[in-house]
Image: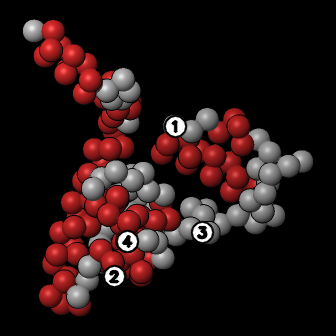
């Protein structure tokens, strides 16, 4: 019996496996990990769909968006917390939408970056009030924090 215990102790690792910390991390990051897996599935399906058409592969996708194939491998395993920029580049290359942004029923669409819901100019102070009202109505954003907003879209006094 002692011989068996000696053999077990000899092969037993003194290092902690880290499974507890890994499980805690997965629990704390469950929300983005689940979304990441859904994105990974969409990407893999689209790569598979495009492969016979244009030869799309993980390596081709990586080259097209300027990252390493290893990075794309992490993405398609659902293990990478991507930036919006990376997601946008993947969407552009694959021609798909990975993230849907809900649009409020009171507006038809979300304006493009660099445009505004209300034209702002230095002579139209009412636009600032209208913009604040829209923000508060549509998003619940506390517009009291916007007191420094000027008609030209800058902050300050």
Q: How far apart are marks 3 and 2 (CA)?
A: 33 Å
Circle 1: element type? loop
Q: Earlier in the sequence, mark 3 or mark 1?
A: 3
**Residue nearer the viewer, 101 or 67:** 67
* Residue identified by numbered label 1: 140
Q: Which of marks 2 and 4 is nearer the N terminus?
A: 2
In this rendering, position of residue 119 left or right of residue 134? right
* Residue identified by numbered label 4: 69
Tell me what residue is drawn at x 34 percent, y 59 percent: 75
Q: Which of marks 1 and 4 is in front?
A: 4
Question: Against 61, is 143 above or below?
Answer: above
Where in the figure is residue 74, as x and y percent of width and height?
Answer: 34, 58
Does the rendering let one see residue 70?
yes
Where in the figure is residue 92, as x and y percent of width and height?
Answer: 39, 77
Q: Which of marks 4 and 3 is nearer the N terminus?
A: 4
Q: Earlier in the sequence, mark 3 or mark 2?
A: 2
**Residue nearer the viewer, 91 or 107:** 91
Q: Which of marks 3 and 2 is in front?
A: 2
Q: Earlier in the sequence, mark 1 or mark 2?
A: 2
Does the rendering let one see residue 24?
no
Q: Which of marks 1 and 2 is in front?
A: 2
Crowdedness of circle 2 by 10 Å Cα count: few (<14), some, many (20+)? some
Q: How far apart are marks 3 and 1 (CA)?
A: 21 Å
Circle 2: element type? helix
Q: How far apart are marks 2 and 4 (CA)?
A: 8 Å
Residue 118 numbered mark, or none: none
Q: Which of marks 4 and 3 is in front?
A: 4
Question: Against 46, is 38 above or below?
Answer: above
Q: How far apart are marks 1 and 2 (CA)?
A: 43 Å
Instruction: Look at the numbered discs 1 and 2 and tell me whether their residues touch, using CB distance below 8 Å.
Output: no
């Amino acid at each position: 019996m002692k011989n068996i215990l000696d053999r077990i102790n000899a092969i037993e690792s003194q290092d902690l496996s880290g499974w507890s910390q890994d499980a805690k991390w997965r629990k704390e990051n469950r929300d983005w990990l689940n979304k990441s897996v859904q994105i990974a599935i969409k990407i893999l399906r689209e790569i598979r769909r495009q492969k016979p058409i244009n030869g799309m592969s993980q390596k081709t996708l990586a080259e097209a968006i300027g990252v390493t194939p290893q990075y794309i491998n992490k993405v398609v395993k659902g293990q990478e917390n991507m930036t919006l920029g990376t997601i946008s580049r993947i969407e552009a290359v694959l021609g798909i939408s990975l993230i849907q942004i809900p649009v409020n029923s009171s507006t038809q669409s979300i304006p493009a970056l660099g445009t505004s819901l209300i034209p702002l100019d230095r002579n139209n102070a009412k636009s600032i009030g209208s913009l604040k009202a829209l923000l508060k109505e549509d998003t619940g954003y506390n517009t009291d924090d916007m007191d420094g907003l000027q008609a030209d879209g800058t902050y300050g006094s």
